[in-house]
Amino acid sequence: MVRVRVPATSANMGAGFDSLGIALSLYNTITVEEISSGLVVENQRIGEYIPTGENNLIYRAIKTVFEKVGYKSKGLRIVQNSDIPMTRGLGSSSACIIGGMLAANVISGRQLSYNDILDIATKMEGHPDNVAPALYGGFCTSVMSGSHTVTKSVKIEKPISFMAMVPDFFVLTRKSRVSLPETVTHKDAAYNAGHAALFSLAMATGDFEKLKIAVKDKLHQPYRAAYIDNMEQTFDEAYKNGAYAVWLSGSGPTILAMCSAQNEDFEYNMSRYFESIGQKSSCRRLTIDNVGAIVQVI
Ligand code: HSE
């Protein structure tokens, strides 16, 4: 039996569209066991629906690895226990994909490297900014080179907090990507390239005061704002309360704010703000996960 614990992630991080991502301290713990026949999928989280047939994402990820390495399994039992809110922009699908693929790799004799797994996970997910930190942990900058994903992950050791402001509505990445234009101006592309580069360097060196500028984006957030109630107003409020940087997490609807670990009032102040505008949003204080996915053979 193999157990894999995979962290939640926040992708894009402002200007780093489809590139930057960070692992966070919420987890999906997935257990996979070979059985004599059939497929059994169990969800230990009461009240949350997940598909239990062959369309289950963890199962599809396992199958992708088995097909790639030519492994035939008689049957599988998959148990998921996840803290990661689904379809809220916190990498719930990536956690399923990485968890399933790592478990399948162990069951089928560890024929794939982590880089191979990152490549096929990116192909399945469509972009690398969630799957890379789910696998490696820390803060990751990733790019595609042909069919390969090239990523650099750094641990952030300075004490920082991440406030996940999770509204009670959901946004499908598929739908939210449709709102993005096919082409952008050279000026906007150059703007984002520079800002994402500064963001990466400022994060890696702990120069967090620069992030407020570096996080600015012209490629996706302005278009996605239409789907996210009070997005800009919430960004402004988070900055008023001392955030270093605020961004739409993945394709939303969660808004992530990064702030000093000493900023103890942030959560309370933002909860009061959401109450004052009549928006149902839960605020959760998270930390960075510098470890990434952990595999355990039981
Ligand atoms: N980079 C992706 C997007 C992340 O913005 O659509 C969503 O999972």
Image: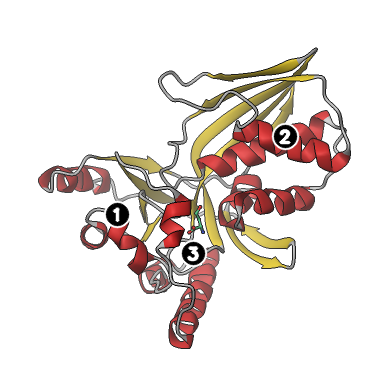
Can you name the residue that lies furthest to the top here? Answer: 36
Q: Quadrant of the C terminus?
A: top right
Label at residue 228: 1
Element under label 1?
Answer: loop
Sequence-wise, the earlier of marks 2 and 1 is 2
**CA–CA distance between discs 1 and 3?**
30 Å
Residues 234 and 78: in front is 78
**CA–CA distance between discs 3 and 2?**
37 Å
The answer to which image quadrant residue 111 occupies is top right
Element under label 2?
Answer: helix
Q: Nearer the viewer, mark 3 or mark 2?
A: 2
Q: Amino acid at mark 2?
A: Ile
Residues 68 and 108: in front is 68
* For the residues bearing labels 2 and 1, Cβ distance under 8 angstroms: no
Residue holding disc 2: 62
Q: How is the image coloured?
A: secondary structure
Residue occupying the point 74% across, 61% down: 148
Label at residue 206: 3
Q: Position of residue 189 (x, y in %)?
A: 49, 80
Sequence-wise, the earlier of marks 1 and 3 is 3
